[in-house]
Image: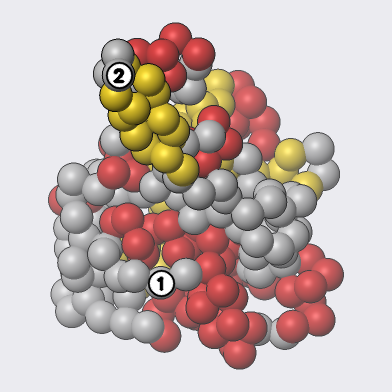
């Protein structure tokens, strides 16, 4: 299958994917729902939708519900917001457990191989690439990165890289920005990319929201035949690894 449209080049040796796993971090509590707040204005009471700070952190991001499902939540986020394939973390979790070893998953989490097998099984194309940090800025699709944070291996959605800052969708902590130094310290140098039909080049995942702040909250009141991957900004610097 051609990969030029997505900017990827198969030039490196495949990695032993079964060892690239994520134990994830502690799962968050269920995302808060939007509720209606009432504001008095003269003799009238006006209702407006209100979101908690915590709920806003998970805008356009599927939160993980178990301590080993960050990979499933990351996949669900990309399927929902980049490809318009409506799914949920539990649906992916159940189906991935059918093709993985449940005991290993509960102990260590899903591996990139599990994620690749699941992605390919539903007619998409999942590939992992060893890539230098500088090439991440040229990506035109969101990816999934494995981070090792204080001993916890955790999958996050790699949304966008701007210079020395990395926008990630963290299934446990929400949308956040990491410095290049912190990201590279935790990152294993591999990015998992999903390519396929139906990709939305204007996906919200590639347009991350600015950092949450009290000031901003105040202002806010008022299957892929012959896929070509170069169009997705994944060029020669991306070395195919599995």
Q: Secondary structure at mark 1?
A: loop
Q: Secondary structure at mark 2?
A: loop
Which residue matches tag 2? Answer: 43
Q: For the N terminus, which image quadrant?
A: bottom left
| Disc 2 from disc 1: Cα separation | 45 Å
Which residue matches tag 1? Answer: 87
Left or right: where does residue 63 sit relative to residue 108? left
Horizontal and vertical percent for residue 168?
49, 38
Horizontal and vertical percent for residue 122?
37, 83
Question: Quick one: which residue is furthest to the front in this view?
Answer: 43
What residue is drawn where x is 74% and y is 83%? 102
Can residue 36 be seen by looking at this rendering?
yes
In front of the other: 191 or 60: 60
Density class for disc 2 (Cα within 10 Å; few <14, some 14-19, many ≥20) is: few
Left or right: where does residue 60 sit relative to residue 241? left
As drawn, 220 above or below 124: above
What residue is drawn where x is 40% and y is 72%? 87
Horizontal and vertical percent for residue 190?
53, 50
Density class for disc 1 (Cα within 10 Å; few <14, some 14-19, many ≥20) is: some
In front of the other: 80 or 7: 80
Can residue 157 be seen by looking at this rendering?
no
- Front disc: 2 or 1: 2
């Amino acid at each position: 299958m051609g990969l030029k449209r997505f900017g990827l080049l198969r030039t490196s040796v495949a990695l032993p994917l079964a060892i690239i796993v994520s134990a994830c971090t502690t799962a968050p509590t269920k995302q808060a729902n939007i509720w209606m707040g009432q504001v008095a204005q003269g003799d009238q009471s006006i209702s407006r939708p209100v979101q908690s700070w915590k709920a806003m952190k998970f805008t356009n991001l599927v939160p993980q519900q178990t301590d080993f499902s960050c990979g499933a939540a990351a996949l669900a986020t990309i399927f929902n917001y980049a490809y318009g394939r409506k799914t949920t973390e539990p649906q992916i979790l159940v189906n991935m457990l059918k093709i993985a070893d449940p005991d290993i998953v509960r102990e260590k989490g899903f591996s990139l191989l599990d994620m690749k097998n699941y992605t390919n099984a539903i007619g998409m194309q999942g590939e992992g690439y060893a890539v230098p940090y500088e090439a991440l800025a040229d990506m035109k699709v969101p990816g999934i990165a494995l981070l090792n944070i204080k001993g916890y291996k955790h999958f996050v959605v790699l949304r966008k890289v701007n210079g020395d800052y990395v926008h990630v969708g963290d299934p446990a902590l929400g949308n956040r920005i990491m410095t290049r130094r912190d990201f590279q310290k935790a990152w294993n140098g591999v990015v998992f990319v999903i390519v396929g039909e139906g990709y939305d080049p204007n996906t919200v995942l590639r347009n991350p929201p600015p950092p949450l702040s009290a000031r901003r909250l105040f202002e806010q009141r008022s299957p892929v035949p012959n896929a070509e991957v170069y169009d997705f900004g994944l060029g020669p610097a991306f070395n195919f690894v599995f």
